[in-house]
Amino acid sequence: MKMLVAGGAGFLGSHLCDRLLADGHQVIALDNLITGSLDNVRHLKGREDFSFIEQDVTQPFKIEGKIDFIFDLASPASPIDFVKIPMEILLVGSYGVHNLLELAREKQAGFLLTSTSEVYGDPLVHPQSEDYWGNVNPIGPRSVYDESKRYAEALTMAYHRYRGINTRIVRIFNTYGPRMRLDDGRVVPTLIDQALNNRPLTVFGDGSQTRSFCYASDLIEGIYLAMRSSEHQPINLGNPHEMSILEFAQAIKKFTGTSSAIEHQPLPADDPKVRRPDISRAKKILNWEPVIGFEEGIKKTIDWFAAKK
Ligand code: UDP
């Protein structure tokens, strides 16, 4: 099939391009490189089955020829971006998704939106299942991301219900692995970078807040299976293995062997206290669950960052 990956030079977008190409599909990657990087797709340059177009999907654009399926992974997703490029995040979740859904309509293509666990906000239900409507602050610093993704979900469902588009929605929980940006600000690259350089590991708050980390290849497999399914309702994708951020920092200390100390810093506003996916629907509908354990995944990720140094 001919696939279009918006955000194809990003962390997950580029892994998805690899996965689709490995399965014999043709891939067009679109990216405006605001947070993505050509380094992530450099190994694909020159392949006949791959093309890259530098394009901001919030602006009008045309693609020649047929497209069978559109994957929308185009959005900055790190909390440091929420304050650095808030307008871009709001626009890519609204105009960007709209443009891509219109392209799906024109090409009669399928469409998959990558949404986020952030639609659940600072959740009052734990673990989070898809039928939970969330606890989102609509005007807080995280709202530019949370609300743009919630709008994107509403838009996607409306295009499914009223325009007959063959849509999918996956809600991605914290995911990590090679190709994350070093200066991404998120806890995984930040703490690995600090550990490898023997700088203090910055734990925000007392570190009792929890996250559940999924390795990139597992997540990509889930996205791939969602594309192949015929499920239009949202599906959580993530690894239910939950840990506190303090436990995470201790694991980074252990696996890097760093001499760095843990340094507590203020907790950012509206930082979710807990997060863990209920993946019953993904298991049932997609027959999917993560296979890479935390120790294996984090060691691979540390090795990748160490090799880049
Ligand atoms: N965090 C931290 N130190 C850092 C970066 C993040 O303690 O240097 C915390 C952050 O406050 C949050 C968790 O780690 O509780 C995960 O943050 P991240 O930015 O990776 O993504 P989030 O899950 O909040 O979107």
Image (spheres, rainbow, N blue to C red):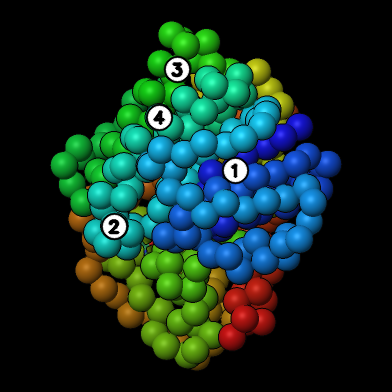
Tell me the element at label 1. strand
Pick the residue in front: 9 or 246: 9
Given contact means CB atoms under 8 Å apart, are the residues at marks 4 and 3 in contact? no
The residue type indicated by label 1 comes to Val
Is 91 rendered above or below residue 101?
below
Residue in view at x 35 percent, y 35 percent: 95
Pick the residue in front: 133 or 81: 81
User: Label 1 crowding class (10 Å Cα cut-off): few <14, some 14-19, many 20+?
Assistant: many
Distance from label 2 to label 4 (Cα)? 20 Å
Tell me the element at label 4. helix
**Residue picked out by circle 1:** 5
**Residue picked out by circle 2:** 85
User: Label 2 crowding class (10 Å Cα cut-off): few <14, some 14-19, many 20+?
Assistant: few
**Which corner quadrant of the image does residue 99 belong to?**
top left
Question: In which quadrant of this rendering is ligand 1 seen?
Answer: bottom left
**Residue picked out by circle 4:** 98
Given contact means CB atoms under 8 Å apart, are the residues at marks 4 and 1 in contact? no
Distance from label 3 to label 2 (Cα)? 27 Å
**Residue picked out by circle 3:** 159
The quarter of the image holding the N terminus is top right
Distance from label 1 to label 3 (Cα)? 19 Å
Residue 165 visible (yes or no): yes
Residue in view at x 70 percent, y 44 percent: 27
Q: Nearer the viewer, mark 2 or mark 4?
A: 4
The residue type indicated by label 4 comes to His
Distance from label 4 to label 3 (Cα)? 9 Å
Given contact means CB atoms under 8 Å apart, are the residues at marks 1 and 3 in contact? no
**Which corner quadrant of the image does residue 57 belong to?**
top left
Tell me the element at label 3. helix
